[in-house]
Image (cartoon, helix red, strand yellow):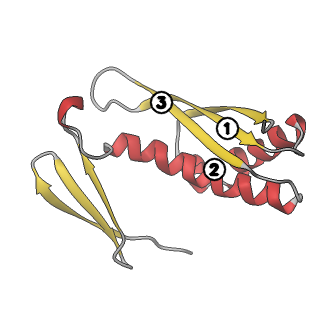
Amino acid sequence: MSKKKITLHMIADHEYESVNLTGNTVNMDMYAAADKKHQSPMELLLSGLAGCSAVDTVLMMKKRRKQVSDFKIEAEGIRSEGTPSFYTEIHLLFELTSPDASQAEFEKVVRLAVEKYCSVASSLKSEISFTANVVRPS
């Protein structure tokens, strides 16, 4: 069993710093958009999901000896009304720039990353969908 632990420190009423056991920090806030300095906890959840899926996707493509010129994921979540305002849907848009990857191969790898290997996705109760696109470099 693997155990993870963070310590959260209040900076101000709507601003916090999270520190892991090795001293890495992540700042977050719940300010209005005009005053925002960091991601909110719900944005960080999307970032965690995207990051977890990204690592597995890129490593699997490279294991298949495919070139990865660029890679990005856009994560969009729809939240419920009321409290708590949880994600009811999350959509991930995967975009790979590669001269030699096929669309079918990339979609298969993305499906494996999201549905089988990503620990963050497995930890969520919301329905997670995804789109995978290969972009040919110019």
Mark 1 and mark 2 in contact? Answer it, CB < 8 Å.
yes
Residue 31: x and y in percent read 19, 37
Mark 2 falls on what kind of element?
Answer: helix
Residue 79: x and y in percent read 40, 26
83 left or right of 124? left
Q: Which residue is mark 2?
A: 53
- Disc 1 residue type? Phe
Q: Which residue sits at x=67%, y=46%?
A: 71
Please, is residue 124 above or below residue 16 in the view? above
Cα separation between marks 1 and 3: 15 Å
Q: Which residue sits at x=33%, y=44%?
A: 39
Please, is residue 63 above or below residue 87 in the view? below
Label 3 vs 2, first from the N-terminus: 2
Quadrant for residue 106, please give it: top right
Please, is residue 128 above or below residue 54 in the view? above
Residue 8: x and y in percent read 24, 63
Mark 1 falls on what kind of element?
Answer: strand
- Disc 3 residue type? Gly
- Disc 2 residue type? Ser
